[in-house]
Image: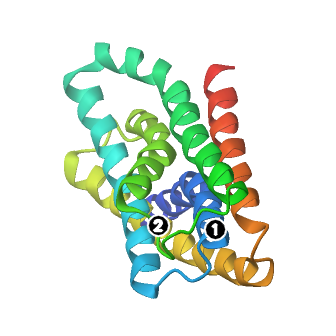
Amino acid sequence: MRRTFIINAFLLGIGLAMDAFSISIANGLNKPKMKNTRAFLMAFVFGLFQMIMPLIGWLIIHYLANSFVFIEKIVPYLALILLGYIGIKMIYDAIKNKEENPDIETGELLIQAIATSIDALSVGLTIANLDFLDALYEASIIGVVTFIICLMGVYIGKAGGNKFANKTPIFGGIILIVVGIKIFITGVL
């Protein structure tokens, strides 16, 4: 029973981490000179948000179930707006050859983390039958899996960013926009 629980949490973590993984690659492409400490921070923030959102979903299911229906309907719109904005800004800055910081800005990182993890609120539905400690345990596994996957994504992106230096911010912006559209389409349809 416990082994199945861990395997399910691990697989759920992989599934939830894919959007954050794509964004991590885009960030690495856009910022190939990003410091290792910033790469770790980025992966940590993505993992933290992927851990917190299912717990918020669990709390909503247990205490505010009627409000969850409203929140679930606006998630795709929020993700599209947030990721679309950052993607367009990234493309605009690349075209204008704007001198940039080699690390991702904290505000930008938080917006990306929220946009890529907000759909994890719905995981609260799948863990609603668990007690809080088991929900916390599952959410922690999801967070750790996301951290590892996103850290790999940043380094994959950085390797590509160093190779294709001038074109990668545009490609990274396109990835952000595509992920936002994907979240929107799957959430609305």
Q: Position of residue 154 (x, y in %)?
A: 58, 74
Left-right relation of 162 to 188: right
- Cβ–Cβ below 8 Å for labels 2 and 1? yes
Question: Can residue 183 be seen in this snapshot?
Answer: yes
Instruction: From the viewer's side, name the closer residue of 6 and 33.
Output: 33
**First reached walking from the N terminus: tag 2 or tag 1:** 1
Image: 13 above or below 154: above
Q: Position of residue 131 (x, y in %)?
A: 23, 45
Q: Amino acid at mark 1?
A: Asn
Left-right relation of 145 to 22: left
Q: Which residue is mark 1?
A: 30
Q: Residues within 10 Å of mark 2 (few under 14, many from 20)?
A: some
- Secondary structure type for disc 2: loop
Left-right relation of 3 to 130: right
Instruction: From the viewer's side, name the closer residue of 106 and 77.
Output: 106
Q: Position of residue 99 (x, y in %)?
A: 56, 68
Which numbered tag is attached to residue 104? Answer: 2
Location of the C terminus (image quadrant): top right
Left-right relation of 178 to 126: right
Q: CA distance from mark 2 to mark 1?
A: 9 Å
